[in-house]
Amino acid sequence: MKEALLIIDVQNDYFPGGTCELYHAREAEDNIIRLINESRKAGRPIVYVRHINPPDDTFFLEGTPGCEISDRIKPRPEDIVIDKNYPNSFLETDLEVCLRSLEIQKLIVCGMMTHMCVDTTVRAAMDYGYKVEVAANACATMDLEINGEVIPAETVQKTYLASLKGVFADIV
């Protein structure tokens, strides 16, 4: 089964000093670096997804340093970079065409934010017929709030991974 590593939205705005800092972003990035190294050794294609928000948003603004992929995991010329404007990495992008042209059947998914773009992309990947593994320690999220109650990032992370487990993906 031909695999690809799919790295979602590991962009500067999610790290300390960025406009939308995530919980344990550096730790997740350290694990992404390990996945990149393993993928390169295995000859596995690496696909980066970069989110670009509209100009009236507060982060991931095109042309700003915060929108750029983290320097620690910069793509190489042989890697694929897909830009997106929605949480779902497949929506109005060339991701599906790219993966089919490479004859990919399985995605190893990592990145940011677990509760938004990772979750949405994993669910869509299942709809497209891909087998999916999510590298839990290579994903990051943030505290969320509803009705004045803060849900800690650790709880958000566990909840979203648990909801993906089984039907949508294997969590590794």
Image: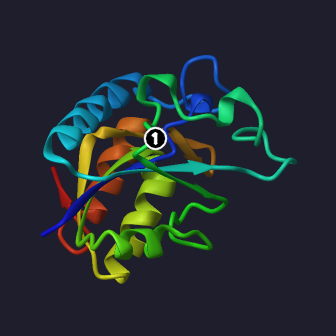
- Going by the image, does 91 lie left or right of 61? left
Outermost residue toward the right in this view: 56
* Image: 33 above or below 59: above
The x, y position of residue 100, in whole percent, is: 36, 76
Instruction: Label 1: state its secondary structure.
Output: loop
Residue beneath label 1, please? 77
Outermost residue toward the front in this view: 77
- Going by the image, does 11 lie left or right of 128? right
Residue at the (61%, 50%) spot, across then down: 51
Residue at the (35%, 37%) spot, across then down: 154
The x, y position of residue 141, in whole percent, is: 45, 40
Residue at the (67%, 30%) spot, across then down: 66
The x, y position of residue 164, in whole percent, is: 29, 64
Outermost residue toward the top in this view: 17
The x, y position of residue 40, in whole percent, is: 23, 40
- The color scheme shown is rainbow
Q: Residues within 10 Å of mark 1 (few under 14, many from 20)?
A: few
State the residue in front, 157 or 52.
52
Q: Name the quadrant of the N terminus.
A: bottom left
Residue at the (29%, 82%) spot, across then down: 129
Classify residue 126 by image quadrant. bottom left
Amino acid residing under circle 1: Pro
So how many labels did they put on this image? 1
Classify residue 20 by image quadrant. top right
- Going by the image, does 167 lie left or right of 80? left
- Going by the image, does 109 lie left or right of 66? left
* Image: 153 above or below 48: above
